[in-house]
Image: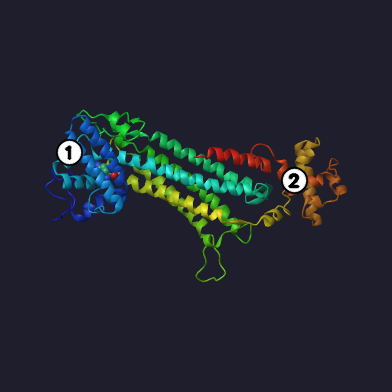
């Protein structure tokens, strides 16, 4: 027969224990072991409240509190290791208390179920882990904004359809990334606000007949309030969905940024050279310097999206209130949070060490007629209807192609005047890549002073 090292909490009802493989199948200790400190925090609040309410003797509450503090300490120092043959972290901690304190340990679970316990643990954990992730997000955006400031005036081609479109600046491009990151931050902080409710006292699903003080445990644990409804409290995993979704969106952003980075680092673009320590080589091709970090971040976004799908699918069709299916929530959620956090750190390191080839970026603005829109706007400023201006600039581009000229500015003025009499000498100064960028100084635009303003706004919004 199976001999479990840790007592099974529900062994009283069942004459037979599951086979070892089956017991391991339904256990969650390998995943929820990371909730150990939070489980202890929750139990300390619960036992303090039980003592205060006279549900357990005050001395028992005090003894439990001492031993819970010891357990936390021993786990932190490694003196106590979590027994992976326990069913879950809740059983393990309660088992330890009972092993050490006897009947006092057996009192800790009064008025509580693992169903409310696991969500209180998870919420405590998330209130710690998500701000850490937000810190990584802020730090990553801060590095990008520093680089944006450095390159507020570094002109480069902007693209649509991956075809060179109009000159922008590297600063403008990096601010675009940070604008997305700032919204990601908002999704995490919004989710954190909504999950800030304490489920303790909800029991298995139906609360408890014992005179628990739910306000007190919520307060001790620093939650804004106790949850409203005990069935919702144990069945709800919206917070996991919201966070998994915030992670998936963040990873989608990082994946797109990395795609840009991979392109920039290619010989074909040549806009960016990654630091050697943020590159990898090839086992066969001696010359290779590959952007593996960017590719791997891009690749991992798939799994994080998958985690969100897994959670949505997990919840769909679950009858109220608690079902064991819910145990599957943590693996996906932890993986999403861990992956997003690590990817932010890797992306930050990679981008901090990258060297931008500004000469090459500026040169890439020439030869593809990226100034054509600005030429059309030049004519609009002189009073020509836009559609006519568009056509005149298009014809000027055609003339250039026919004559083998690389830019509109290489056309002599009489040639340009054939397309529109409104072209004057001042057109030449207006069509350099830097002039095109400088002219687009509307809010949101790529002009260096406007990019610096955007950097300021983003810095303020991303402040911790
Ligand atoms: N390990 C479980 C989970 O993560 C804890 C709750 C178990 N409750 C139960 N009735 N089996 O969801």
Residue in the foreground of this view, choosing between 119 and 404: 119
Label 2 element class? helix
The answer as to whether callout 2 falls within 8 Å of ligand 1 is no
Residue 68 in the image: state x and y as whole percent: 24, 43
**Which residue corresponds to the image point at 13% horizontal and 49% vertical from the top-left?**
16
Q: Is residue 58 visible?
A: yes
Marks 1/2 in contact by CB < 8 Å: the verdict is no
**Which residue corresponds to the image point at 56% horizontal and 48% vertical from the top-left?**
144
- Disc 2: which residue: 435
Q: Residue furthest left?
A: 15
Q: Nearer the viewer, mark 1 or mark 2?
A: 1
Residue 195 in the image: state x and y as whole percent: 38, 36
Mark 1 or mark 2: which comes first in sequence? 1
- Figure quadrant of residue 324: top left
Residue 398 in the image: state x and y as whole percent: 78, 51
**Which residue corresponds to the image point at 30% horizontal and 45% vertical from the top-left?**
37
Mark 2: few/some/many CA within 10 Å (<14, 14-19, 20+): some
**Which residue corresponds to the image point at 28% horizontal and 46% vertical from the top-left?**
72
- The colour mode here is rainbow
Q: Is residue 108 visible?
A: no
Horizontal side, residue 136 vs residue 206: left or right:
right
Residue 75 in the image: state x and y as whole percent: 28, 50
Is 155 rendered above or below residue 442? below
The disc placed on residue 107 is 1
- Figure quadrant of residue 98: top left
Residue in the foreground of this view, choosing between 211 and 206: 211
Q: Indicate the quadrant of ligand 1 in the picture.
A: top left
- Figure quadrant of residue 108: top left
Could you tell me how far apart the alpha carbons at marks 1 and 2 are, in whole angstroms? Answer: 76 Å
Label 1 element class? loop
Horizontal side, residue 206 vs residue 144: left or right:
left
Horizontal side, residue 117 vs residue 191: left or right:
left
């Amino acid at each position: 027969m199976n001999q479990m090292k840790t007592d099974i909490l529900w062994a009283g009802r069942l004459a037979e224990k599951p086979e070892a493989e089956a017991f391991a199948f339904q256990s969650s200790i390998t995943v929820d072991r990371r909730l150990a400190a939070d489980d202890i925090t929750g139990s300390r609040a619960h036992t303090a409240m039980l003592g205060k309410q006279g549900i357990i003797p005050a001395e028992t509450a005090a003894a439990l509190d001492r031993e819970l503090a010891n357990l936390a300490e021993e786990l932190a120092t490694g003196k106590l290791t979590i027994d992976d043959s326990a069913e879950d972290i809740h059983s393990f901690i309660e088992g330890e208390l009972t092993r050490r304190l006897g009947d006092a340990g057996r009192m800790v679970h009064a008025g509580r179920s693992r169903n409310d316990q696991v969500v209180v643990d998870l919420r405590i954990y998330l209130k710690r882990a998500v701000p850490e992730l937000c810190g990584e997000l802020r730090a990553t955006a801060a590095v990008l904004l520093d680089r944006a400031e450095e390159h507020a005036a570094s002109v480069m081609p902007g693209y649509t359809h991956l075809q060179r479109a109009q000159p922008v600046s590297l600063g403008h491009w990096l601010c675009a990334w940070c604008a997305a990151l700032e919204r990601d931050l908002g999704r995490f902080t919004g989710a954190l606000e909504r999950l800030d409710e304490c489920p303790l006292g909800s029991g298995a699903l139906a609360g408890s007949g014992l005179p628990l003080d739910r306000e007190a445990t919520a307060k001790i644990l620093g939650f804004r309030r106790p949850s409203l409804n005990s069935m919702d409290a144990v069945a709800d995993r919206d917070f996991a969905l919201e966070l998994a979704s915030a992670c998936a969106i963040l990873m989608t952003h990082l994946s797109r940024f990395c795609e840009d980075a991979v392109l920039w680092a290619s010989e074909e673009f040549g806009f960016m050279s990654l630091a050697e320590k943020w590159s990898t080589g090839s086992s066969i091709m001696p010359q290779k310097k590959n952007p593996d970090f960017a590719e791997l971040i891009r690749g991992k976004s798939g799994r994080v999206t998958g985690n969100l799908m897994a959670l949505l699918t997990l919840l769909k069709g679950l009858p109220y209130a608690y079902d064991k299916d819910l145990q599957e929530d943590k693996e996906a959620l932890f993986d999403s949070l861990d992956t997003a956090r690590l990817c932010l750190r890797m992306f930050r390191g990679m981008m901090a060490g990258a060297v931008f080839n500004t000469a090459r970026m500026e040169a890439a603005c020439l030869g593809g007629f990226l100034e054509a829109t600005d030429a059309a706007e030049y004519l609009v400023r002189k009073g020509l209807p836009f559609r006519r201006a568009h056509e005149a600039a298009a014809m000027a581009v055609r003339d250039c192609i026919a004559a083998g000229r690389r830019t509109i500015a290489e056309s002599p003025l009489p040639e340009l005047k054939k397309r529109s009499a409104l072209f004057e000498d001042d057109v030449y100064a207006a069509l350099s890549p830097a002039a095109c960028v400088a002219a687009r100084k509307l809010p949101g635009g790529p002009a260096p002073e406007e990019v610096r303003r955007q950097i300021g706004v983003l810095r303020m919004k991303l402040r911790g």
